[in-house]
Amino acid sequence: MTDVVPEPDLSAGLEAILLVVDEPVSEMTLAQVLERPTAEVAAALRRLSAEYTEAGRGFDLREVAGGWRFYTRAECATLVERFVRDGQQTRLTQAALETLAVVAYRQPVSRARVAAIRGVNSDGVMRTLVTRGLVEEAGTEPESQAVLYRTSSYFLERMGLRDLDELPELAPFLPDDVENLEEQK
């Protein structure tokens, strides 16, 4: 007998999706993903936004640019800035190191490509690396218009490298069939 995991309620589903988005998501897209009527999703989004405001949460759910996204409340901005600024002195997480390695060896590279290589969404980690100045935008991909990223001069400085040619070769550390491994993901 297989245990069936019940579907989360609409509010929980919306919150889970909105926590991982990088750009505002339309009501129609959310309705399609959650397999619910658009009007029901729109009402739930407005209700959640009002609940967060009423509860005085440190974040807000806003409708901007044709979609919905979480934002830090204005009155918390100085705390967030302090955290981000002070966080530059902390060590990078394993996820940040992996993402930074992908960018360093595959640049210029899109967030989607980084996620495909790592096998997990890397948007939050990429934002952290950009905020810390280790990664920067490097134009857009012609076909998809996706933003491309590269390592910064600050990355080279922190790593003690003159240029990217000084990065160690990856070949000795990779399996022989690395191209097929990447395609299987």
Image: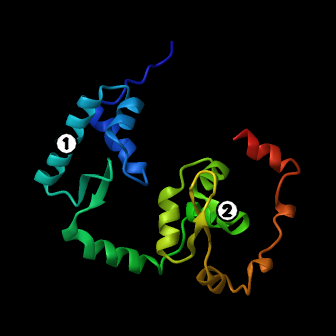
The label on residue 46 is 1
Specify the amino acid type for callout 2. Val
* Helix, strand or loop status at disc 1: helix
Viewer-side residue, 44 vs 79: 44
Depth check: give the residue in front, 183 or 87: 183
Where residue 42 sits, quadrant-wise, is top left
**Mark 2 to mark 1: distance in Å?**
38 Å
Residue 14 appears at what percent x and percent y? 32, 39
Residue at the far left: name it. 54
Circle 2: is it few (<14), some (14-19), or many (20+) Cα within 10 Å? many
Image side of residue 89 versus residue 96, left or right: left
Residue drawn at (30%, 26%) of the image: 37
Residue 12 vs 106, above or below: the answer is above
- The quadrant the C terminus occupies is top right
Q: Is residue 185 left or right of residue 154?
A: right
Residue depicted at x 23% and y 69%: 76
Q: Earlier in the sequence, mark 2 or mark 1?
A: 1
Neighbour tally class for label 1: few under 14, some 14-19, many 20 plus, Cα within 10 Å: some
Q: Are marks 2 and 1 in contact (CB under 8 Å)?
A: no
**What is the x, y in percent for residue 102?**
67, 62
Q: Residue at x 61, y 62 (%)?
A: 99
Residue 183 spot, x, y in % from top left = 75, 42
Q: Which mark is residue 102?
A: 2
Image spot of residue 87 (x, y percent): 43, 76
Mark 2 element type: helix
